[in-house]
Image (cartoon, rainbow, N blue to C red):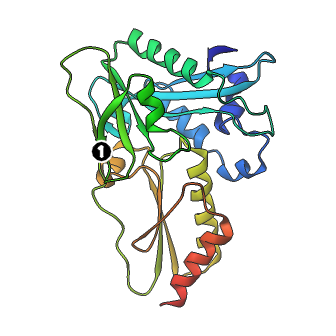
């Protein structure tokens, strides 16, 4: 297993989060490719783990915190770290130390760039991006969203630094009388959220003039800071759970229910 920087050869696999075998990923569109083009010259780092057949089996992506979800001047922020865990495609490569190797490579990279530390987000439930996994690698909690919400974890590279903080949500969409408003917030880096965005847009366009689809592109920093939301879906003023992405059928059904209440 080797760790490399992202190259053109692996761009398609990267943009599909290593799931280029998964037909569902076609629904993600080109949002991640566009996001990558806008961020590649702003300090974005992407490293891939390759197996013995030179297939990408893991990835980590990180960028300067001023382009991220955290208030952490001089730090870098991890957007995600993922080791392929399905039987399809390149197969399950989890629990082989690949995630640890990717994290180490990223930390070494940002240290060479002069970063003060690294931040990441972590979940308390035992799924993906577990806060407990980062803590085993020397990270500590810096902030948390709510009692059981995601944690902001942090590894400073020197003493005496102030802990980073989440950039919190500042407002949410308002319900507009006489119509159903579908507000889709899109950053672009996550194919799963891109799928949700495209499904919501398609359903909204098919359901007629009483459904207003609002496209809010949070890759534009001022827009993100205005809302404090990176990726999300609202139907009127109610947030829809988008992790994992709900099916097109489920999104359409939720919008239809709101139409019936008008």
The residue that label 1 is drawn on is: 167
193 horizontally vs 114: left or right:
right
Where does the N terminus fall, quadrant-wise? top right
| Element class at badge 1 | loop
- Residue 107 against residue 184 in the figure, above or below: above
Name the one closer to the observer, 129 or 255.
129
**Residue sitting at x 61%, y 58%:** 198
Quarter occupied by residue 238: bottom left
Residue at point 65%, 21% (across, down): 49
Q: Is residue 256 left or right of residue 20?
A: left
Q: Position of residue 163 (x, y in %)?
A: 23, 30
Is residue 6 visible in this depiction of the protein? no
- 173 w.r.t. 118: above or below: below
Q: Residue at x 39, y 12 (%)?
A: 111
Q: Residue furthest top?
A: 112
Image coords of residue 226 (percent x, y): 29, 52
Instruction: Residue 254 in the image: state x and y as whole percent.
Output: 56, 76
Q: Dot 1: few (<14), some (14–19), or many (≥20) neighbours within 10 Å?
A: some
Q: As displayed, is residue 215 above or below residue 53?
A: below
- From where the camera sits, is residue 65 visible? yes
**Marker count (numbered):** 1
Residue 157 screen position, x and y as percent:
31, 15
Kindly indicate the quadrant of the structure image that contains residue 36.
top right
């Amino acid at each position: 297993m080797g760790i490399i920087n992202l190259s053109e050869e692996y761009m398609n696999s990267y943009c599909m989060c290593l799931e280029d075998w998964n037909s569902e990923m076609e629904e993600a569109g080109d949002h991640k490719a566009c996001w990558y083009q806008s961020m590649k010259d702003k300090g974005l780092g992407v490293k891939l783990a390759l197996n013995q057949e030179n297939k990408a089996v893991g990835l980590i992506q990180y960028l300067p915190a001023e382009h991220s979800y955290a208030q952490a001047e001089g730090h870098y922020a991890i957007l995600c770290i993922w080791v392929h865990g399905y039987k399809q495609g390149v197969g399950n490569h989890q629990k082989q130390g690949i995630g640890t190797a990717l994290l180490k490579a990223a930390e070494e990279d940002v240290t060479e760039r002069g970063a003060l530390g690294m931040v990441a987000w972590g979940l308390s439930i035992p799924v993906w991006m577990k806060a407990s996994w980062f803590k085993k690698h020397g990270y500590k909690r810096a902030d948390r969203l709510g009692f059981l919400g995601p944690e902001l974890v942090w590894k400073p590279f020197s003493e005496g630094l102030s802990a980073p903080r989440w950039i919190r949500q500042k407002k949410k969409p308002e319900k507009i009388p006489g119509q159903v408003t579908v507000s889709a917030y899109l950053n672009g880096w996550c194919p799963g959220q891109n799928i949700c965005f495209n499904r919501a847009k398609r359903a909204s366009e098919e359901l007629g003039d009483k459904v207003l689809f609002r496209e809010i592109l949070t890759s534009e920093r001022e827009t993100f800071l205005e809302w404090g939301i990176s990726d999300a879906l609202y139907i009127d003023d109610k947030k829809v759970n988008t992790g994992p992405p709900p099916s097109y059928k489920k999104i359409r059904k939720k919008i239809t229910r709101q139409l019936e209440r008008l």
